[in-house]
Image (tube, helix red, strand yellow):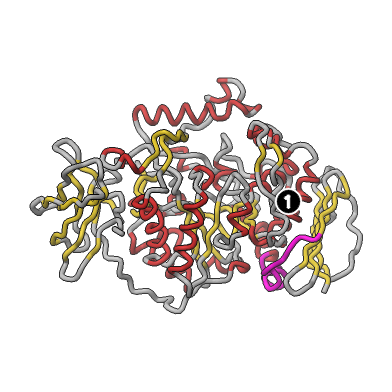
């Protein structure tokens, strides 16, 4: 088994490796030093040892015209087309006793490093985040991408920390500070594709992809090939070991289409880090409960929770919201009791094809619930947040459901401050690629009623414009104090009444008792019953007293009780 990436040895000597089965010869170039011919084995692995201390810049010369960065580079100098940099993984950690937090204690805040001032900008915000009752931050991808600004899902060097955000040491300082404050740190990783700018793999390792399997990004990633499998598993282990990340969220695994890879990866990660709380979370459009039932993955992002609540809160039914438009209250009831709404039924947005598997036997904590996230805000044409799409009373009730319900809650940066700043799709591409991304983005919204005509679509912000990025920096809203107080109160109640009872909590029943009124009950770990009533209708009915201890009430729109 050969590992990817440079290995810094004693005496400032470094071993360099590259899997380039399509090439007969590869030369190692170290900035300011003579070139070194690399040895090739039968499987196409090239290796060479050379004097190169931490900070040395290097690249691989494939031929006279083409030199490429290390695909497992830990840091770049000059962007994804520039030199790779040797990095010393050693770091003087302060929170040496940190082993993580149990999954049931997780309350996630998703953040984008670029819009928050890089790693140092986030680090400065950590004390306030911890004081609010949030227990974990989730970083959108931080690996290297083309240009200076990007969501991170166009990354091409999964091992390298993006230069605009800071250095590897600054990321480790952010994580160390978080741990010292009792905060877990999660990271979003993308193993289903590479971005369009700076991916050189096809120039020397075409077997990295299945050309015959078409995806929106080209040939499918060949995760069944051992070098490719190792590339991604070792990447996951790097984040968890070298950076002491507490959990990973695997982006869009439905696009990988290889459950065996997912299961094997999770098993290897679990075996490698048995002494820590390491949490693995999926994004999977297929609603595949089997991956959760096997025990390797803690949870899946539950888009169904968001989608049905978005319909109830806003009345929007275009595009994929159409899957949740009819009988929305019944769909919400199923979501609260069983997790997924689609459990094998035909989905109109998926050409009527069945989607999902039965999930009612899973614990409620197998689902990450949210009202907003980078996708659900940023994939709106104008980046609108919910606070601009619904009224205050309904939003407060939905927030109470999110934070006092037994699914694991996720917030999106700015949400807890009533931010009205949009979060738009932004990139930093140029020339023909910039044109293709801009026009492709606008075509995506033709299926939405508000952007059915070309003139309306032309108003969608250009992803490559600097102003699109700048306007996505979250600012506290005009009622920031009110929203901060609400989140602090609800999170304090969650810590006292919900978290200690969460492990193994399951849905008991969920009943529709009005047009948009649902009452749900869960059996908690200690045998207590949690009851929640939410009413998102036009004229909510009065909430009658119920048995048990009232935890929280939001007028006639929401109430939660615990019965011992």
Q: Residue 253 at x, y = what percent?
A: 51, 47
In which quadrant of the rendered image does the C terminus lie?
A: bottom right
**Which residue is farthest left?**
34
Picture coordinates of residue 217 (x, y %)? Answer: 43, 36
Q: Is residue 147 visible?
A: no
Query: Left or right: 16 with respect to 382?
Result: left
Residue under the point 65% across and 53% down: 479
Q: Is residue 125 above or below residue 313?
A: below
Badge 1, how many Cα within 10 Å: few under 14, some, many 20+?
many
Q: Main secondary structure of the magenta part?
A: helix
Q: Nearer the viewer, residue 292 or 518?
A: 292
Report the front residue among 473 and 97: 97
Label total for image: 1
Looking at the image, can residue 110 be seen?
A: yes
Give the SS element for disc 1: helix
Front residue of this view, candidates 215 and 432: 215
Q: Which region of the structure is painted magenta?
A: 491-508
**Residue extending furthest toward the front:** 42
* Residue 187 x %, y %: 47, 57
Report the quarter where the N terminus lies.
bottom left
Most extreme residue toward the top, as rendered? 454
Which of the 4 image quarters holds residue 381? Answer: top right
Q: Residue at x 44, y 51 (%)?
A: 141
Residue 438 coordinates in the image, percent (x, y) = 45, 30
**Can residue 384 be found in the magenta stretch?**
no
The furthest residue to the bottom: 97
Q: Is residue 58 left or right of residue 323?
A: left
Report which residue position mark 1 lands on: 335
Q: Quadrant of the rendered structure where residue 8 is?
A: bottom left
**Picture quadrant of residue 20:** top left
């Amino acid at each position: 088994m050969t590992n990817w990436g440079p290995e810094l040895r004693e005496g400032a000597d470094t071993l360099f490796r590259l899997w380039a089965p399509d090439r007969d010869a590869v030369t190692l170039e170290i900035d300011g030093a003579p070139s070194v011919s690399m040895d090739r084995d039968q499987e196409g692995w090239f290796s060479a040892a050379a004097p190169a201390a931490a900070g040395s810049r290097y690249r691989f010369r494939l031929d006279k015209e083409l030199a490429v960065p290390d695909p497992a580079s830990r840091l770049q100098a000059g962007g994804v087309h520039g030199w790779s940099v040797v990095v010393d993984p050693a770091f003087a950690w302060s929170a040496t006793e940190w082993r993580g937090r149990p999954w049931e204690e997780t309350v996630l805040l998703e953040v984008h490093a670029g819009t928050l001032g890089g790693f140092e900008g986030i680090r400065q915000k950590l004390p306030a985040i911890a004081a609010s009752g949030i227990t974990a931050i989730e970083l959108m991808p931080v690996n290297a991408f083309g240009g200076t600004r990007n969501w991170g899902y166009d990354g091409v060097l999964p091992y390298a920390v993006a230069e605009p955000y800071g250095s590897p040491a600054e990321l480790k300082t952010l994580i160390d500070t978080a741990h010292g404050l009792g905060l877990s740190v999660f990271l979003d990783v993308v193993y289903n594709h590479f971005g369009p700018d700076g991916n050189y793999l096809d120039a020397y390792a075409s077997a990295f992809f299945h050309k015959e399997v078409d995806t929106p990004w080209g040939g499918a990633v060949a995760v069944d090939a051992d070098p490719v499998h190792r590339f991604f598993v070792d990447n996951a282990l790097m984040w968890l070991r070298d950076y002491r990340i507490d959990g990973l969220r695997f982006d869009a695994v439905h696009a990988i289409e290889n459950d065996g890879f997912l299961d094997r990866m999770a098993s290897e990660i679990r075996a490698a880090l048995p002494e820590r709380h390491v949490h693995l979370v999926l994004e999977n459009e297929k609603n595949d409960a089997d991956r959760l039932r096997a025990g390797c993955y803690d949870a899946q992002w539950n888009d169904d929770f968001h989608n049905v609540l978005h319909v109830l809160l806003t009345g929007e039914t275009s595009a994929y919201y159409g899957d949740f438009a009819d009988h929305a209250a019944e769909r919400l009831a199923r979501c609260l009791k069983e997790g997924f709404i689609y459990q094998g039924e035909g989905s109109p947005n998926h050409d009527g094809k069945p989607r999902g598997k039965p999930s009612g036997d899973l614990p409620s904590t197998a689902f990450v619930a949210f009202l907003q996230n980078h996708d659900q805000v940023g994939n709106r044409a104008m980046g609108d947040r919910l606070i601009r799409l619904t009224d205050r009373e309904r939003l407060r009730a939905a927030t109470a459901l999110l934070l006092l319900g037994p699914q694991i809650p996720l917030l999106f940066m700015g949400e807890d401050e009533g931010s009205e700043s949009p979060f738009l799709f932004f990139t930093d591409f140029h020339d023909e690629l910039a044109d293709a991304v801009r026009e492709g983005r606008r075509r995506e919204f033709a299926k939405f009623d508000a952007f059915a005509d070309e003139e309306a679509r032309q108003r969608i912000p250009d992803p490559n414009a600097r102003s699109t990025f700048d306007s996505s920096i979250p600012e506290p809203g005009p009622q920031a104090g009110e929203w901060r107080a609400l989140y602090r109160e609800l999170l304090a109640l969650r810590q006292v009444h919900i978290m200690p009872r969460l492990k193994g909590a399951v849905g008991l029943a969920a009943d529709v008792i009005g047009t948009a009124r649902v009452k749900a009950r869960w059996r908690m770990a200690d045998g207590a019953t949690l009851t929640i009533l939410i009413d998102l209708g036009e004229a909510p009915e009065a909430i009658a007293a119920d048995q048990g201890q009232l935890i929280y009430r939001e007028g006639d729109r929401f109430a939660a009780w615990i019965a011992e």
